[in-house]
Image: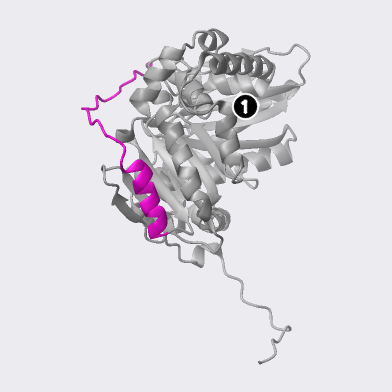
Amino acid sequence: MPQIDRSIVPPIHDAIEFEYRLPALNSLHLDNGIPLHWLAAGVQEVASVDFVFPAGVWQEDKHSVALAVAGLLKNGTSNRTAHEVHEALEFYGASLQVSAGDDFCIVSLYALSKDLPSLLPVVQEILTDAQFSDSEISIFRQNAIQRLRLNLRKCEFVANQKIDAMLWGGTHPYGRYSQIEKLEAIRREDLLHYFKKNYAPSGLQIFLAGRVGETELALLNQYFGSLPLQRTAQTEIHWDVPAYSRQTQRVENDPKGVQAAVRIASFCINRQSPDFPSLVVLNTLFGGYFGSRLMKNIREDKGYTYGIYSSLQPHIHGGSLCIQAEVGREVTEEAIAEVYREMELLRKNPVGEEELLLVKNYLLGGLLGDLDGPFQLIHRWRTLILNGLDAAHFDRNISIYKSVTPDKLQALAQQYLLQENFSEIAVV
């Protein structure tokens, strides 16, 4: 074997030079028509199964029901108590996570591949026969209210609640937030109605990844392909968004507080917009990573905060852009002014090529980690499919990340980074 000449420095490649490809996804329908998407990858004998239902806040017809159903889903069936359900999962070292978001609820099973024959019937029982007993609801309600009371003492929690409500309106699903009186009003019949309507097999999509093959596909078909589907005409859900008017609020939550939780937000585009990938680059440069404009100015130069970030929040039915930071109480107004100053600079001056290359490499370098391993890959595919997108969309995004120009970013800043479009709140 030839010796390596360690006096020669190996070539260094920018992330922008790499090729990025999503491995092909396999898709089929179970015997009853439930779509199953699967990816065989990885070297460890593990598997993940995501069961995705249209059961987010968007589908609520009563406040806090989506959260309660997700929180109580594993707490008992007709045949098992909550303790017995958790014991059945823990016996195999499996994890069953339930996450209710704005648009979907995702139930994620992580387990050894060999244990799926024992675990899938338990999961099927949970997803079709959850009971929501009054005793479990009472415990959930008590715990949720206690957590809420504690969280309401935290300025950042209050700021996060109020900025969404300022933007979307307090009755809109994307603007709702937990309230004690709404949690107290939860009743078993509300949860059963929501569960029956939104966790129906007719709305289910399944995503499988890991060391899996025909055996695992047959198991999923056995336990979920045999479920009866009652297909009914789906009525489109529509929620009114209040007419936009810029709002500013200053709230004293803690008279002795030394920090203010600042949130500045505006409506924005979602993943379906052709401008979204370019806006991802602009947002990264503006406030999306530790070397961003906001961080350099407000943290490093001014010392107003330990950290400040901006993030895009794309939903299925809309989107927003939000800047968030905890700053010294006495410099709250100065910090907010600097945020708008950075917006103005991006509107007026094209980004330098060197800075833009750094941002592109950061963005694409992070993507390399997101494409490493079967679970990360299936999550990337899941996001595409749930948003009605495909692999060509992913490829287009990569191309834009690599090729977007300073002029394009300046044009986006002039469209999306306008102070008059942003509402703001500071909670001390």
Dominant secondary structure (helix, strand or loop) of the stretch shown in magenta: loop
Furthest residue in direction left, as rendered: 233
70 is higher (above) or lower (below) than 397: above
- Residue at x 30%, y 22% (from the top left corner): 238
Residue 412 as seen in the image, left or right of residue 197: right
337 is higher (above) or lower (below) than 389: above
Q: Is residue 357 visible?
A: no
121 is higher (above) or lower (below) than 200: below
- Residue sitting nearer the eye, 427 or 132: 132
- Residue at x 51%, y 10% (from the top left corner): 182
- Residue 137 at x, y percent in the picture: 54, 16
- Residue 89 at x, y percent in the picture: 57, 40
Give the residue at mark 1: 336
Where is residue 143, by image quadrant? top right
The residue segment tinted magenta is: 213-242
- Residue sitting nearer the eye, 81 or 255: 81
Residue 332 as seen in the image, left or right of residue 313: right
Does the magenta segment cover residue 240? yes
Furthest residue in direction front, as rendered: 79
The kind of secondary structure element at disc 1 is helix
